[in-house]
Amino acid sequence: MIHFRKPTENDGSEMYRIVKQSKVLDVNSPYSYLMWSKYFRKTSIIASCENEVIGFVTGFLQPETPNTLFVWQVAVDEKYRGHGLATKLIEQLLVRLRKENVTYLEATVTPSNIPSSNLFKGIAKKQKTNCTIFECFSENQFPDGNHERELTYRIGPFQFPN
């Protein structure tokens, strides 16, 4: 059985492991996952099965638009992919944040990341809401000149039942 919960600082190393093993996601420093799991607990979520971390979403409320959850990273352990776990993680997080008046979700996705593109478009379709896509960062804004552009996916407004 899969359980959803807020991360703790003890989850950072497992979050790092899942991203590193994915071989597709940008791997941030191990320290960043410790920071996410300790200081962004309210806006992040862990999926676990038999006490093993199998997926997570890291996010934050945007300072300029506090009704918008920015999803930093979505990662699912390879053994659990293809079963809608990423969608469930995001939906569970949005339900938790409805009392914070979160009505929009934003994430950035590279054009070649078709699974993430499908994930966010699918959430918009499932929630019967809009998905607007526009450029966030161009290739030349990245310092190493070796990164695809990032597109923003803005989904919402979400209508949650009372």
Image (cartoon, rainbow, N blue to C red):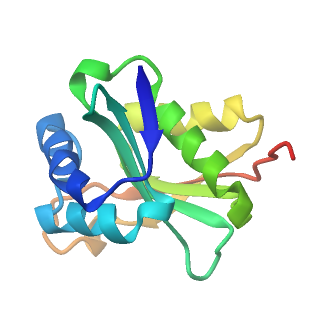
In this view, 73 is above or below 144: above
Q: Residue at x 72, y 35 (%)?
A: 127
In this view, 64 is above or below 32: below
Q: Which percent across, then down, holds residue 74?
A: 37, 45
Residue sitting farthest toward the right: 162
- One can see residue 111 in this view: yes
Query: Quick one: 110 or 5, which is closer to the camera?
Result: 5
Q: Which percent across, then down, holds residue 132?
A: 65, 51
Q: Residue at x 42, y 25 (%)?
A: 2
Q: Residue at x 75, y 48 (%)?
A: 158
Q: Would you say 10 lies left or right of 7 here?
A: left
Residue sitting farthest toward the bottom: 64
Residue sitting farthest toward the front: 51
In this view, 18 is above or below 98: above
Q: Which percent across, then down, holds residue 148?
A: 28, 54
In this view, 154 is above or below 159: below
Q: Would you say 162 lies left or right of 27 here?
A: right
**Would you identify the image quadrant in which residue 91 lies?**
top right
Looking at the rendered image, the quarter that the N terminus falls into is top left
Q: Which percent across, then down, holds residue 20?
A: 12, 44
Q: Residue at x 43, y 52 (%)?
A: 6
- One can see residue 112 in this view: no
**Would you identify the image quadrant in which residue 35 lies?**
bottom left
Count the marks: 0
Q: Would you say 15 lies left or right of 126 here?
A: left
